Amino acid sequence: MPNRSVTLVTYHYVRPLAGSQFPTLKALDLRAFEAQLDYFARHYQFVTMDTVIALFNGEPVELPPNPVLLTFDDGYADHFRYVFPRLFDRGVSGAFYPAAVTAIDRQILDANRVHFVLASIGDPDTLIEMIEAGIESERGAHQLWSTEQYRAEFMTASRFDEPRVAYAKRMLQFVLPDRLRQSIADAAFQRFVTRDEPGFAEELYMGAAELRTMRANGMHIGLHSDRHVWLGKLSREEQAAEITGSFRVLEMLGSPRQNFSFCFPYGNYNRDTLSLLDGFGCALALTTRSAVASLGDARLEVPRLDTNQLPRA
């Protein structure tokens, strides 16, 4: 019976950590990434995104035994500096998903502000104090809960974070009103990381030249929304704007809009998201649901495994 499943692996930060400016950043150390590539080379066979798209769109594709595809979210410059050369040397094609505001506008994502603040301060309680002080100072301007209610609802462990870290991330990614959470995140980033946000963004993310180079050398460049927001929490009209805004990446690369792939920020979406992507001609969309992908999965809800779920030796 022909193989009809494929392992897609999710990566975010991949960088050397020892001796770096942010050694406690939740990243995959470069040596661990290299070891995992060696592991995949021994036990899997690499396939391309074009092959996976063809599979899920019903084309007669022959998959090798134990196929694997590596996917990289958020468009970090790490992916160009460290990942791309190692994939290229092995003849491996990866799939990369930058948000338009990072690749084109050079803006720092809300999630990244929080990551680097936490990596700079060490103790999440410092950031939580800032968040809860902001809640108290803005209570009259917004319909806000008490800090006790927020803690009861959102201070629980997530898939990869202990409760305090998960709480800080949730509060500054989607729980608080936009203006308030952005004000707190901006203040924390400038206080603990840097006041040079444009310079930091230039260092953190890939731009047009890097993405074009990777695409010209066999890497797949997909879409990750315009601003990297929780799509399922937006109206249908707002979601449509996020998806069409992400097309700026395709325009920058001179790629057609048809048969593009999409990666849901935070793995968050709803029925409107799926309907819109289908209408815009999306060929394949990647989730954060943890499973080996198979033809039983919908082409716009393809699961992936995280790098932390797979061996590195």
Image (cartoon, rainbow, N blue to C red):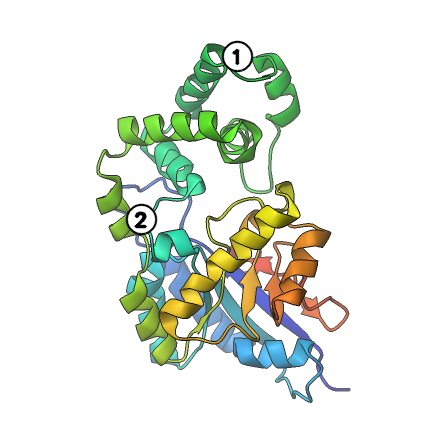
Residue 225 or residue 236, whichever sits in front: 236
Q: Tell me the amino acid under the disc marked 1.
A: Arg
Q: Residue furthest front?
A: 237
User: In terms of image quadrants, where is residue 282?
Assistant: bottom right
The mark total stands at 2
| Residue 252 image position (x, y, % from top left) | 36, 68
| Residue 98 image position (x, y, % from top left) | 43, 59
Residue at 21 percent of width and 38 percent of height: 196
Q: Tell me the amino acid under the disc marked 2.
A: Leu
Query: Dots 1 and 2: beta carbons under 8 Å?
Result: no
Residue 108 or residue 247, whichever sits in front: 247
| Residue 120 image position (x, y, % from top left) | 32, 33
State whether residue 72 is above or below residue 271: below
Kind of element beneath mark 1: loop
The numbered mark at residue 139 is: 1
Residue 52 or residue 264, whichever sits in front: 264
Residue 147 or residue 254, whichever sits in front: 254
Q: Quadrant of the N terminus?
A: bottom right
The numbered mark at residue 17 is: 2
Residue at 50 percent of width and 33 percent of height: 169
Q: Horizontal placement of 37 versus 210: left or right?
A: right
Residue at 47 percent of width and 53 percent of height: 226
Q: Is residue 196 visible?
A: yes
Query: What is the crowding at mark 2: few (fewer than 14 residues within 10 Å), some, or many (at least 20)?
Result: some
Residue at 60 percent of width and 42 percent of height: 159
Kind of element beneath mark 2: loop
Q: Horizontal placement of 63 versus 12: left or right?
A: right
